[in-house]
Image (spheres, rainbow, N blue to C red):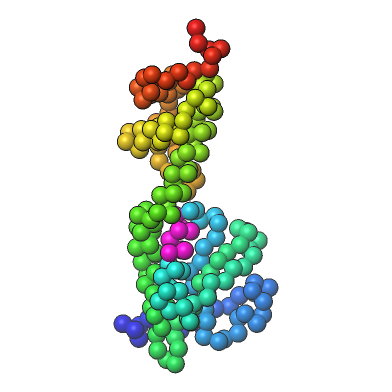
Amino acid sequence: MSEEIIEWWNERIKEQEYPSDYGGENFWEDDGWILSVSYNPTQGKTTEFAFNMFVADLEETDKDNVDVVRFGHWACGWVKQINVRPIVDGQLTQAGEMVYEYVDSNGYDYLERVFESDEYYEWEHQEYMEYIDYLLDSLVEVDADAFTDDDREAIRSYMYETGQCECTDEGVYQWFAKTDDDWYSVFNELFPNKTYMMEETID
């Protein structure tokens, strides 16, 4: 298997050609290093988390043969790429094998791990809380300041349990449109003893 991976890498090393203003001429000298997996800010948070997890595993396993570089890019602002030395003294490095496996699986294992990570949970939680702030501010008859942090957590739990919303790379998406009155009914159910309407709207 290692012979097949070495052949795979040798083909990519031969193909590595970039304009001299992308990283500088000296960067592309044939010194056994090659750019591999990349991330740019147009790809979304889950891909970023997966990329960072993979970088951490690479550096923990074979740090001498891994170097993450960052370039400016006209289309997306910047790009991070894993510069790896896959073959040393004719032998496949651990980094070379790991990058091959990552590319071969399209990073699927790492994308799965993302959804089990604390980092993703914290990001998702923040996205929901920002969405709830936006929701409360958009309901014209509601006094958003009447809702405590615990109240907002209760609304978030409601969204989870009912499948009302989903957090995506683009933010929180509401699957089922609700009118203002629909949300008032939800709040009345969640907080039966709370006064949350603006005073001027109370008859």
Magenta-drawn stretch, dominant element (helix, strand or loop): helix
* Camera-side residue of 189 and 6: 189
The residue drawn where x is 48% and y is 58% is: 48
Q: Is residue 30 above or below residue 127?
A: below
- Residue 135 highlighted magenta (yes or no): no
* Camera-side residue of 192 and 84: 192
> Where residue 38 sits in the image (x, y, percent)?
51, 66
Name the image quarter holding the N terminus. bottom left
For this orientation, the residue located farthest to the top is: 203
Q: Is residue 65 above or below residue 54?
A: below
The residue drawn where x is 49% and y is 25% is: 146
Residue 103 in view = no
> Where residue 102 sits in the image (x, y, percent)?
39, 69
Image mark count: 0
Span highlighted in magenta in the image: 46-53
The residue drawn where x is 50% and y is 7% is: 203
